[in-house]
Amino acid sequence: MSNPYRSLNDWEAHLLQRHPDEIELGVERVKSVAQALGVAKPKPLVITVAGTNGKGSSVAMLASIYHAAGYRVGTYTSPHFHRFNERIQVGLQPVDDASIVAAFEAIDAAAGPTRLTYFEVATLAALYVFAQQPLDVIILEVGLGGRLDAVNLVDADACLITAIDVDHQAWLGSDRETIGREKAGVMRAGRPCVCSDRHVPASVMAQAETLQTPLRALGKDFDWQGTTTDQAWWFLPDASQKTETWSMPALPLKGRYQCDNASGVLALVDWLSDQRPVAQDKMRAGLKKTRHAGRMQQVTWQGQHWLLDVAHNPHAAAALTQALSSSAKAVPHCVCVLAVMADKDVGGMIRALAPVVRHWVLPPLSVERALSSEVLANQLKGAGMAANRIHVSDSMAHALETGRMLAQDESMQAVVCGSFYTVAEALPVMDVSVNESEAVV
């Protein structure tokens, strides 16, 4: 059948128009199409990564470590900042347009009348592309939840569950135990699972026991020691003994919580060493070279140091505040360019960021889900923020310029945060590439 959608941009526009729903949980429809395509059971080692925060960073670390060890790695993540290709990478590089277009054409033919969401098509495209490549390891990032996410159509050889907190309540539940149960849906009987949340929900442990899934958890089975991610730290493969330590380099991904993420990654890599051996020097090399856009990303724009972070829920905002507090003044010292989605816990994010923010600069975003800057300004005032510290802008460019001037005049740290979309719209204004970042500020 001839298809009029020849370019990747044409296909994206078609998919967004034909499948406007961002979320429609359930794996049966997408799994049936995957089986028709012959991609439901990938041959390489497959690792699924679920969690509320830290998924993307953990995928980036896993991929970098296995790449440093000489393995050919495919990764699937979401969302993307500028180009769909960012979601599907082989050898740490986005695949080309032609490969994705070929995948879309095959999916369109195999799906027939089956209705698929944008994310489901993207997931199938990744699996189709990976099936055409001689890969050793595939790493799949769950989009939402776990149990009913499209990624879960694959029976992974192992899974990593990162920090769990309250987010996407309308879909996953309103407390950590309920959400943990959904995340634990990626577990498989008898296959390794690592959890890098220091406080593992009881629901996760119960699911592991029910499935007889071997589970290793941060703080209980493995851990780390150190003072700051700006310096070397030590991974403890056995938390109960604390006699064996592996020296690790300062992490390029900033924030103390990244050592939690890295420890979970190292624990899983070590656990899977009988299938994909990785020497410690390759683990160190992989961690040292890890890059991940929008996660404590440090850039310089017009002579001013900026920190860009996709923190989009209270847990992530608290981690950002902790990172900003650990190496700066105790009083509010940041200019925060903030834009958020309307369906998020905006009040919780404001409370988490308030201890370090002196000025709030509010740009509009081009996505329908975004909370208007005027409504956000009112929420800030309602939370007790001074009106003269709230600056509503009519564009991202104006917001960044306002933030730059305020930071320069008062010698403050400039920050962009609130959502993936916020960072995505700031990057081109700053003329910064997705992977461009300074080693230190």
Image (spheres, rainbow, N blue to C red):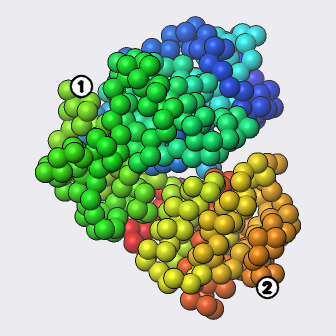
Observer able to see residue 387: yes
Foreground: 267 or 139? 267
Residue shown at 57%/46% (left/top)? 165
- Between disc 2 and disc 1, the foreground one is 2
Q: Residues within 10 Å of mark 2 (few under 14, many from 20)?
A: few
- SS of the residue under disc 2: helix
Q: Which residue lies furthest to the left in this view?
A: 243
Real-space Cα distance between discs 2 and 1?
A: 59 Å
Counting residues from the N terminus, which is met first, the one under dot 2 or under dot 1?
1
Amino acid under label 1?
Answer: Gln
Q: In which quarter of the image is the N terminus?
A: top right
Label of residue 374 in the image: none
The residue identified by callout 1 is 275
Above/below status of 412 relative to 336? below
Q: Position of residue 270 (x, y in %)?
A: 24, 37
Q: Which residue is drawn at 33% across and 48% down?
A: 219
Residue 348 at what x, y percent from top left?
Answer: 68, 59
Question: Observer-nearest residue: 413 or 245?
Answer: 245
Q: What residue type is labelled 2?
A: Asn
Which residue corresponds to the image point at 59% horizontal and 14% vertical from the top-left? 31
Residue 337: quarter of image: bottom right
The answer, for residue 140, to whether it is visible in the render is: no
Q: Is residue 178 left or right of 12 when viewed as pictured? A: left
* Mark sitting on residue 388: 2
Q: Nearer the viewer, residue 399 or 330?
A: 330
Q: Residues within 10 Å of mark 1 (few under 14, many from 20)?
A: few
Taking the spot 20% from the left edge, 26% from the top edge, the residue there is 274
88 to the left or right of 137: right
Is 227 placed above or below 423 here? below
Pick the residue in front: 363 or 175: 175
